[in-house]
Image: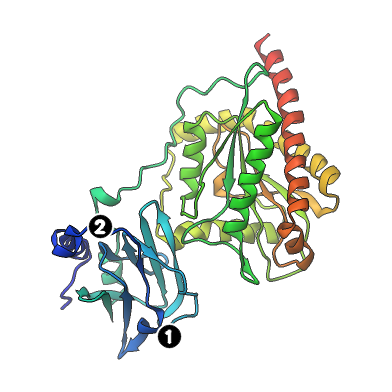
């Protein structure tokens, strides 16, 4: 019989807040002592031991589809804990760590078979040691016990998927509101090559692009994230809607194991991907939410679906025109693009029905030339200038169309 249930894990973790160690007021993040930490098989189960520099509030739970063990901390510095720092257990197929939201860090172990939490505890002393023991259970029991515990301290706001009165379409009489979305972040680093991480690279480029647009004038620019934190895909849309964004641009630089893809590509939303590679990219982007344990999707009722389809009748052509303008301007500013620079795929981050949205793969980190381009300040400046020029041209034409529609 399990001695430790999912909701009890969070209650026990919160109980630490009342302990004397927190009365002193911690001023630094807890650090992981990697050599003193381990992940090991124990009979038919698994033991995770994390040595920390100091006690912190934490919670432990499991999630299903796919099966995962999730450990949240407030808050841990993961530096030094590389993906293969642990001897990988046969029962654990993937380990991910990172920031999850401001003030919280997350570790996720993807499980090859159903293993439920048997015990979880934190021993405190000079530092702290978290020990989680997993034991095999039947599929049905695992599914029944899986789920994040409710907590007022860790409540993620729900994304706003309602179709309220739309913001007034820009018509050239005000600044164009641009929401830039640096892909990935926190526990979802995206592609990695030679020590370069997609999430960091795209955050840096988004900041550079923001500066380029603000210097140009006529733009108001915001970012879905301005730090290395995880932002769920649908939350990115909600942030754009809350900001009254006229346009949403998601920025990526992925890697493909198969083929020799290179060059910038601009995507718009479609139910069917233009090719197999685009389909795989969309699946990988969505998987970040799944691995991190976030499922904020909701089934639209029939009426809402019809309303959103009606809104998209206007928005989709505007997204297409923006994508075309980006291809033209980027071709002028950085030269060679992908052999098929205009593609479509079912990227969840593009599904806001009321905001023209595009996703730009600036290049592929799996291509040596693309990676060198992405690391070049001169190349990034040219790419930012191309996106600026495209937005200017698109906004001007879009404003003219808006004026015609009002007449």
Disc nearer the start of the sequence (1/2): 1
Residue 371: % across, % down? 73, 63
Where the C terminus falls, by quadrant? Answer: top right
47 in relation to 121, above or below: below
Residue 122: % across, % down? 22, 73
**Circle 2: element type:** loop
Q: Nearer the viewer, residue 95 or 354?
A: 95
Residue found 29% across the figure and 64% down from its top: 146
Residue found 21% across the figure and 63% down from its top: 13
Q: Residue furthest top?
A: 407
Q: Quadrant of residue 145?
A: bottom left
**Circle 1: element type:** loop
348 in relation to 106, above or below: above
Residue 15: % across, % down? 15, 61
Position of residue 77 in the picture relative to residue 287 (left or right): left
Camera sees residue 213: yes
Q: Which mark is residue 90?
A: 1
Q: Which residue is mark 2?
A: 149
Residue found 52% across the figure and 43% down from its top: 224
Residue 98: % across, % down? 44, 63
């Amino acid at each position: 019989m399990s001695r430790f249930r999912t909701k009890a894990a969070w209650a026990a973790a919160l109980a630490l807040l009342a302990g004397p160690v927190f009365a002193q007021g911690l001023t630094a993040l807890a650090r992981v002592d990697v050599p003193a930490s381990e992940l090991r098989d124990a009979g038919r189960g698994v033991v995770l031991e994390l040595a920390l520099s100091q006690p912190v509030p934490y919670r432990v739970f499991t999630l299903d589809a796919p099966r995962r063990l999730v450990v949240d901390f407030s808050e841990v510095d993961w530096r030094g804990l590389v993906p293969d720092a642990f001897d990988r257990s046969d029962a654990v197929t993937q380990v991910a760590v990172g920031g999850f939201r401001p003030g919280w860090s997350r570790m996720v172990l993807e499980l090859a078979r159903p293993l439920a939490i048997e015990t979880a505890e934190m021993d405190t002393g000079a530092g702290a040691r978290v020990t989680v023991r997993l034991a095999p259970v039947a599929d049905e029991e695992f599914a029944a016990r899986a789920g994040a515990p409710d907590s007022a301290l860790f409540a993620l706001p729900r994304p706003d998927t309602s179709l309220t009165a739309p913001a007034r379409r820009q018509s050239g009489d005000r600044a164009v509101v641009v929401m830039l979305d640096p892909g990935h972040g926190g526990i979802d680093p995206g592609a990695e090559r030679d020590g370069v991480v997609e999430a960091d690279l795209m955050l840096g480029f988004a900041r550079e692009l923001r500066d380029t647009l603000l210097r140009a004038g006529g733009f108001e620019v915001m970012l879905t994230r301005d730090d290395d934190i995880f932002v769920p895909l649908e939350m990115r849309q909600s942030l754009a809607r809350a900001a009254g964004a006229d346009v949403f641009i998601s920025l990526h630089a992925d890697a493909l194991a198969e083929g020799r893809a290179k060059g910038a590509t601009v995507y718009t939303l479609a139910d069917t991907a233009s090719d197999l590679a685009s389909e795989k990219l969309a699946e990988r982007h969505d998987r970040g939410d799944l691995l991190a344990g976030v499922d904020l999707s909701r089934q639209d009722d029939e009426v809402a679906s019809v309303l959103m389809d009606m809104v998209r009748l206007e928005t989709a052509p505007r997204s297409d025109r923006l994508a075309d303008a980006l291809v033209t301007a980027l071709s002028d500013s950085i030269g060679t693009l992908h052999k098929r620079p205009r593609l479509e795929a079912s990227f969840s981050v593009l599904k806001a029905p009321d905001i023209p949205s595009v996703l730009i793969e600036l290049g592929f980190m799996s291509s040596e030339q693309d990676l060198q381009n992405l690391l070049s300040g001169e190349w990034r400046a040219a790419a930012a200038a191309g996106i600026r020029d495209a937005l200017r041209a698109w906004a001007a034409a879009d404003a003219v169309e808006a004026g015609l529609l009002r007449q």
